[in-house]
Image: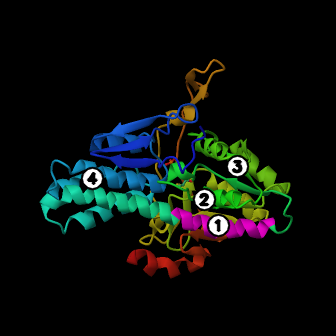
Amino acid sequence: MHIQSQHFRSIWQQANAVYIIDQTRLPFDFVTVELTSLAQICHAIRHMQVRGAPLIGAAAAYGVALGIQQDASDEHLQAVVKQLIATRPTAVNLAWAAQRMQQTLMPLAVAQRAAAAWLAAQAIADEDVAQNLAIGQHGKALIAEKATVDANQAVNILTHCNAGWLATVDGGTALAPIYAAHDAGLKVHVWVDETRPRNQGASLTAWELAQHGVPHTVIADNAGGHLMQHGQVDLVIVGADRVTSQGDVCNKIGTYLKALAAFDQQIPFYAAVPTPTIDWQIARGAEIEIEMRDADEVAYMQGQTATGDIQTVRVIPRESPALNPAFDVTPARLVTGVITEHGVFAPDQLHALKTHSLGD
Ligand SMILES: CSC[C@@H](O)[C@@H](O)C(=O)COP(=O)(O)O
């Protein structure tokens, strides 16, 4: 069976447990995991069994629900929220979702909170799916504009990291317009950046696109600029972990270099994000905390041997240190537009969304 977003969400609740797809096992094994405690949710977020800004937001919401089942007092609820927010610093959806859970639950009687928490988490998950569907429709129009130049030629879209349905509850952000265009019969082809060090592009985006039947090619992270120079990229669409109020885009490390090359080649560069990814508290991308992850993620790579075994191998000298900043910031001046569930906005027009999102 081809596994597509319509068969699975990337996270779901059943009885008093939460289920996820273990993304550290893809593309080789499709494994679902049952999580029954706050500690297990925190571990899954930290170790990237679940990852992607919208998905870790939803995971945090379900984590609050799991964390308060035995004790829903004010003190414990606040401690649970704090613990979840500490798991990863950069994607703002995590703090947004945990804080929204707290704001929803605090006014309720303590005895009502455990049950209400499941409903509140479910609402966050459902909203994410609806937002991504809308992003898909708005972004599809941008792809369709490119397709009208020559309907027989595929529109070539470059993406970085994984911002597909696996990075969200369902539907994806950067991949939502691509799925919508492909499903509507438009010819698309996706250049998939491998996205070292964790290879979310090579392992996850490529897997998703293959399952969905979307034509794509995996490229080394360094190939994008060359392809742009040779007219082989029509537009770039990436996701984001946080977008500031003035439109600076924080996304997986390496995104900035793609934006620079796209700008130089006058290729449109879009970030696709649901509004919970916009941080209205921060104007400048320099204010965002960039997660520094374990250097071993750079020093080692995981792969499958010809006989099917999964192996982890070291790829740098034993004596060489490594550094692993997980995200970078693309300044607003390099960003053509931000594709949201409410439409496409130039970075300097994003503020028009503020009342919308805060009112949500
Ligand atoms: C949809 S989130 C934006 C993505 O492009 C990407 O940066 C991302 O998935 C976050 O990275 P990860 O470190 O895998 O959680």
The C terminus sits in image quarter: bottom left
Location of residue 155 in the rendering, given as x and y in whole percent from the top left corner: 78, 59
* Residue beneath disc 1: 139
Residue at image point 29% right, 61% down: 101
Mark 1 vs mark 2: which is more N-terminal? Answer: 1
Location of residue 293 in the rendering, given as x and y in whole percent from the top left corner: 47, 42
The circle drawn on residue 176 is: 2
Q: Amino acid at mark 4?
A: Ala
* Residue beneath disc 4: 65
Q: Which residues are magenta?
A: 132-147
Contact between marks 1 and 2 (CB within 8 A): the answer is yes
Q: Residues within 10 Å of mark 1 (few under 14, many from 20)?
A: many
Query: Which corner quadrant of the image does residue 33 belong to?
Result: top left
Residue at image point 61% right, 25% down: 304
Q: Is residue 20 left or right of residue 248?
A: left
Of all residues shown, which one is farthest toward the top?
307
Query: Which corner quadrant of the image does residue 41 belong to?
Result: top left
Residue at image point 51% right, 51% down: 167
- In three-dimensional space, the C-alpha distance between marks 2 and 4, rounded to whole angstroms, equals 28 Å
Mark 1 vs mark 3: which is more N-terminal? Answer: 1
Q: Can residue 78 be seen at all in this image of the molecule?
A: no
Location of residue 222 in the rendering, given as x and y in whole percent from the top left corner: 72, 45
Q: Main secondary structure of the magenta part?
A: helix
Please tell me whether mark 1 sits on a helix, a strand or a loop: helix
Contact between marks 3 and 4 (CB within 8 A): the answer is no
Residue at image point 60% right, 75% down: 345
Q: Is residue 148 left or right of residue 1?
A: right
- In three-dimensional space, the C-alpha distance between marks 2 and 3, rounded to whole angstroms, equals 12 Å
Contact between marks 1 and 3 (CB within 8 A): the answer is no
Q: Amino acid at mark 2?
A: Ala
